[in-house]
Each structure stands twice: as C-alpha cells, then as structure tokens.
Amino acid sequence: MKKILFNYIVVLWSFCMALTSCSHQPTDVTKADQLPAIYPDYIGVTIPAGIAPLNFNFADEDIDCLDVVAKGSKGGEIHANGAWADFDVEDWHELTERNKGGKITLTVAVEKEERWTQYQDFDIFVSNDALEEWGLTYRLIKPGYENGGDIGMYQRDISNFDEYAMVTETVVPGYCMNCHTANRTNPNRLNMQVRGEGGGTMLMKDGQQEWLNTKTEETKAAGSYSYWHPDGDYCAMSTNSVHQAFFTGTGQRIEVFHTFSDVEVLDIRTNQLILSPLLRTEDLEIFPAFSHDGQWLYYSTSKPCDVPKEYEKVKCSLCRIAFDAKSGEFGEQVDTLLNGPATGKSYTLIRPSYDGRWLMYTVSERGNFPVCQDDADLWLMDLTTGECRELKELNSKWTESFHNWSDNSHWLVYSSKKEDGMYAQLFIASIDGQGKVTKPFLLPQRNPRAFYREMMHSYNVPDFTKSKVELDAHEFREKLLSNKRQNVTIKGSVKD
C-alpha cells in the first residue's frame, strides 16, 4: 500500500511539475565540451529493446529546464522536455525495437538562469539479444535488524514502471519472508520460506499453494536458501540458523553468521528430503544451486569457527557433488572448485548460467553472508576452461551480491550498494558468448531522483520472472496463520 501511495504521489507531482516547468525549445545555445552530468549514469550502457524508458535527471537540481532529443542510428527520434528526461513509454519502446543492434544518441541541453547549454552527445546501445522475461521479483527490506519490519515481496514489470506487491509484512505482521526462488525464472514452480515461530515453507505448484514443515527430527532447522532442479521435481535447500552481531567504533555495522548449516534436497512429488552425509558434516554447507542440466549440485562450505568471536576465520570454498535425478541420489565424492582457506577468500552464492557456460559467484575476504560484506564482489568462472575473473565492469568499493540470470543467459541482474554504501539497488547488464559484460544500468524509474531519494528500502534476492507471479496474498495469510503444515519425511536411511 505504501508503494502504491508513493507511486501515486510521484505521478501527481510529475503532472503538477509539467504544468509549471518549461515547455520551450533551446535557443541561443552555448555548446560545452563535456558530457552531461546525469542521474542515473546511463551514458554508454547497453539495454534490451522494450525495457522501460531510461528516464534521467540532471545532476544540478537548480536548472530551469532539461531538453533531450533521442535519435536512433537506424531511424526514429523522440523528444523530452521538462524538469527531467521523461520519455513516453510507447515511443521509447518503438525507438528501441527499431534500433536493435544499433544505438540511440542523446543530445542534452540545459536551461539555467535563462541561458541554454548543450552538452556532448552520448550513446545508449540496444542489444540484439532479447530480454524476454516479463519482469523482476525481489524482496524490499529496510536496513534494520529486527524481526519483520516492513518487509515485502514485490514484482516489477520491466517494460514500464508498474510495481506490484506479492505479499508484505502488513499482511502477516511480525513474520520474516525469506528468500523466494522460482524455477529458471518460471513462477509455475516457486517457493518461499517464512521464518520465525509459526513459520513454514510455501511451495507454489502451477498456482496452488502448499505449506510444508521442512524441519524433521534428523534435520536441525527448516529449509532456506533454496534452488530448483531444472526439471522442477526437486528443490535444494540449506538448513541453518542465522545470527547477527554488531560492531562498535569500527566503521562496520553488522556481521551475519551461521552456527550450523547443512544442504538437502526436497522431492516435491513425495515431500521427502534426500540427505547425504557428505552434505551434513561438521562444516557449514550453504547456498546450494543445481547446474543447468541438473547433474551437479554446487554449494559453499566453510570450517566451523567460534563465531562471532572468530568471524574473520570464516572462509567458504566452492564445491560440487553429483546428483542423479532419476534415482534421486547424490554422488559419493565432493569436488572442490575454489578453496577458500587456501586462497584466503570466501566464495558464496553460486549461480550457474542456464546455458551451462558460466558460474557467477561472490568473493569476499570472509563470511558466508556476502550482502553484509562491504568488499563483496562478483566473479565469473568459465566452465569450459575453469578460468575465473573478477567482473570489474560491475564491481565497486561497496557490496555487490544477490545475482541471477535471464533464461537465455544473455542478461543478469544483481544488487549493489555502490550508490551510497547503505541501500542495495538493482542493476542489469548484458553478457555475450565470450563473457564480455556491458556497463550496468540502474533499474529505471519514472522520476529516478525522486524515487530513489525517497526509497528507504534495500532490494535483495532479485530474479527475472517469465510472467507475473499470481500469488494470492489472502490465501498466503490464511494458510500461514492456520499453522497447518504437511510434514516432510526422510528418504532412505542416513548415517551422520
């Protein structure tokens, strides 16, 4: 409701500004030998056709008028004139579709104190690779540290500026809605964990909600941090306890850590957990992810430490274990792909591309919860060669994490705190067959400065979605509060 009210206020304010702002064209223009200072920085980015307009503000807030002409290299031209660059959605879509594989050149002129200045043109490139997903799903959460606290699961139509709440903390007060996961951007298989007393695991199969209790006598906690097998019959989860510790006088805010963590797989056809002693050791196994073909399960693991006292010793390795979907069985050995203790780094949040070519993951100096590590960066492993490289095109001095792929593996979305070091925002970039990543662009908003200045939430756990998620929030509330859960069972016998 708060988001809807805010969007209404922005639209109303935009209308009022349009009545009072400039509507005349640049005259007696002085040309400046520099690029315009704009927010967000969309200069030189690559976008998919059909994305929402890349509206922007001029960095200097004291201008009288902003005039922008956007001209396609393959034809077409649109114009924006007002307090900020506010392009018509349909006109923008037509321009981007016409210029696939080409570019859009923008000419920016600014009026201040009755004088017009025109800046150097800049380009926005339009990729030939489509971003076919309908939109994005994500959690919005304030950077507070209490249970609940205005948490919500949202989705956004990326062809325009429409945002929809799926379920929010106002519907289920006091509950923490944890990482939601869809099967390869397809919401016909979706799960979400609700933490806290009376919580549970929600599975949505073809629009039908099923609520499970995924904690058993043999497992230490309910499942979380999940990832679907590509055939949709299995969902890998870690089972762990999450804790927080706070710094004083160090410039750091918080350390999130786990006192135990194992990995398991849920067969959603039988509601049975598939366990392996190799994934239930004294070490902390966390953040599972199936390979594109489902034959491997990747995960991170770290040696047990006396946390939070020894928080700096937490170094996660990147590992994998074979998985046979036909028999529902794990392999008998673990491969270590990147050794955290040996390199002095921590490797977490593995996300394989759906075409089987890449592994994207997070690297930090320590810890197994990278969103709270200021130095967390994104890296890429080429699965054909094993070569790894830092994604310098995306990284900053602040946190980069929570990343996911589009279904065709040509686009990626991730969260970054690079704008202010506090709030995580969403960025999108493209990647080609050689692993070249383009300059990322901030998720477009109708009036970016007004939106992000008033935005007091962080985006996390973003993912693309093929279609709008049809989640009935009333049914969600009723089934959560009813406390009726189907208990899962253990498949076979397990030696601990």
Image (spheres, grey):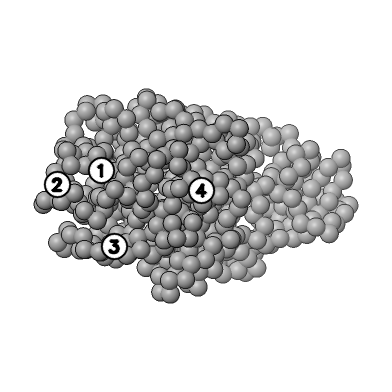
Residue 278: x and y, percent?
24, 56
Residue 490: mark: 2
Q: Is residue 44 visible?
A: yes
Q: Is residue 466 visible?
A: no
Q: Give me the residue at 78% from left, 59% from top.
A: 120
**Mark 4 or 1, nearer chain start:** 1
Q: Which residue occupies the foreground of this view, 353 or 333?
A: 333
Determine the residue located farthest toward the bottom in the rendered image. 385
226, above or below 308, in the image: below
**Mark 1 or 3, nearer chain start:** 1
Q: Residues within 10 Å of mark 1 (few under 14, many from 20)?
A: many
- Please give the residue where the numbered disc 4 appears in the rendered image: 415
Residue 203: mark: 1
**Mark 2 or 1, nearer chain start:** 1
Q: Residues within 10 Å of mark 4 (few under 14, many from 20)?
A: many
Q: Give me the residue at 53% from left, 54% from top.
A: 377
Q: Quadrant of residue 260?
A: top left
Q: Residues within 10 Å of mark 2 (few under 14, many from 20)?
A: some
Between tags 4 and 2, which lies in front? 2
Label 3: which secondary element: strand
263, above or below 483, in the image: below
Q: Callout 3, which amino acid?
A: Val
Q: Which residue occupies the foreground of this view, 395 or 30?
A: 395
Q: Quadrant of residue 296?
A: bottom left
Horizontal arrangement in the rendering, residue 103 relative to residue 268 (left or right): right
- Please give the residue where the numbered disc 3 appears in the rendered image: 334
Q: Callout 2, which amino acid?
A: Ile
Between tags 1 and 3, which lies in front? 3
Q: Give me the residue at 59% from left, 61% from top.
A: 393
Q: Quadrant of residue 466?
A: bottom left
Label 4 and label 3: CA atoms lie apart by 30 Å
